[in-house]
Amino acid sequence: MDHEVVIYIHGISPDEKLATFADERKVERLTDQVRQRKIEISHQSEYEKLKNGISRFIRDESRQKAWNQVDYCFTEWGWEFQETDAQNLGAGHRLKDAQHQLGQRVIQAIKDSYWITLIPQQSIRKLALYGLSDVFYYVSSDGGHSIKRRICHQIASRLRDVLDDPSAQVSLTLIGHSAGSVIALDLLPFLDELSMEELIEQKTGLDKEISVAQKQRKQEGGGYRKIDAVFDDSRDVIDSLMRLKSLKDDRRLTLKRLITMGSPVAMMALRRDQRIRDLAYDGNRVSLASLGFADAGDAIDNPRWVNIWNKYDPISFPVEPMVEESSSVKDFHLKVAWNPLKSHTNYWNSKNVHRLLAELW
């Protein structure tokens, strides 16, 4: 059975909206108010605006029906939107907490250092500290490992019924904004790089740990403990990665389209030796196959990589100059906001973006 799946991945958050939940963690069970607060500060409203905006611009009835039947996966990363302490998910869910705690002290030290300046240094430094440090974390070995696993776990959890269908053919449309566009571009190659043998070995080792812990608890006469929840979470993550890896290896998980908005991909192209070798010589470009577009040479009606950028957004870049020339890749320069301060975050709300993606769908 064929399944269309749209996955949304947010980007940097250059503000303090996602403040720490340290106080709430002192409570054993989160209150309804805290849960509601997490929903409010999540990126769900942005995802919904894009999803509904595209729907409004789809005029054809059959295409509208197809859009409404799509499975949607809203993802979150960088903060503790979901209580899980899985050992193999790293510390990525503490990123916003760390930014918040460090930022409070650093920004205060800056305020104490001068009284007035004609240059908006505080705003610029806040953007760098609360925004770009997300990107720095992601491109580190720890960050890339943590975030990609966390995103894959969310996708597999959300689509569990689909993935359990042995006849499922899953077609993905990945929509990433800012740093989320880099994650989206890396996601399928990440699955290719995973080793099923290593995942099986990790699961076997974890099962042995669980067995030992259960025997010890039985001898002590204790009940369910936090370490048991950590074990359960960790096993679920490995299962998620194995599900997606198996589906990808069997060619039942394919990329229909990658949509990047406000993307720093070109700015971050030189984060691997191979990319430097690709681009260091006159006229050389990055091959699409190396980016996960294995069948990029096939004839298609519309581009498979749609990159939306805005000249007022200093974090967005065209990607066509970076990759080999192909009809599979298309840059679209759109006006998403007249206000330069909103130019990087308004892609989700832009009618121009909604109209373009509806036409391509």
Image: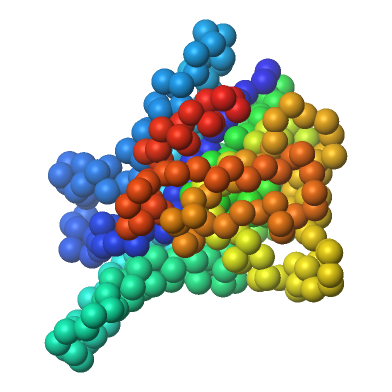
Residue located at (40% from left, 38% from top): 350
Which residue reaches farthest bottom?
113
Residue closer to the observer: 102 or 221? 102
Point out the image quarter for the N terminus: top right
Image vertical order of residue 103 relative to residue 26, above or below: below
Residue 124 visible at all: yes
Where is residue 209? Give x, y as percent: 55, 61
- Between residues 57 and 63, which one lies in front from this camera angle? 57
- Rendered residue at 72%/58% (across/down): 322
Q: Is residue 52 left or right of residue 103?
A: right
The answer to whether residue 13 is left or right of residue 100 is: right
Q: Residue at x 35, y 68 (%)?
A: 127
Q: Split into 4 quadrants, where in the image is the C terminus?
A: top right
Q: Could you say where residue 78 lies in the image, as x and y percent from the top left? A: 41, 59
Looking at the image, which residue is at 34% across and 62% down?
14
Q: Is 164 displayed left or right of 107 in the figure? A: right
**Looking at the image, can residue 145 be seen?**
no
Residue 313, percent across and down? 45, 57
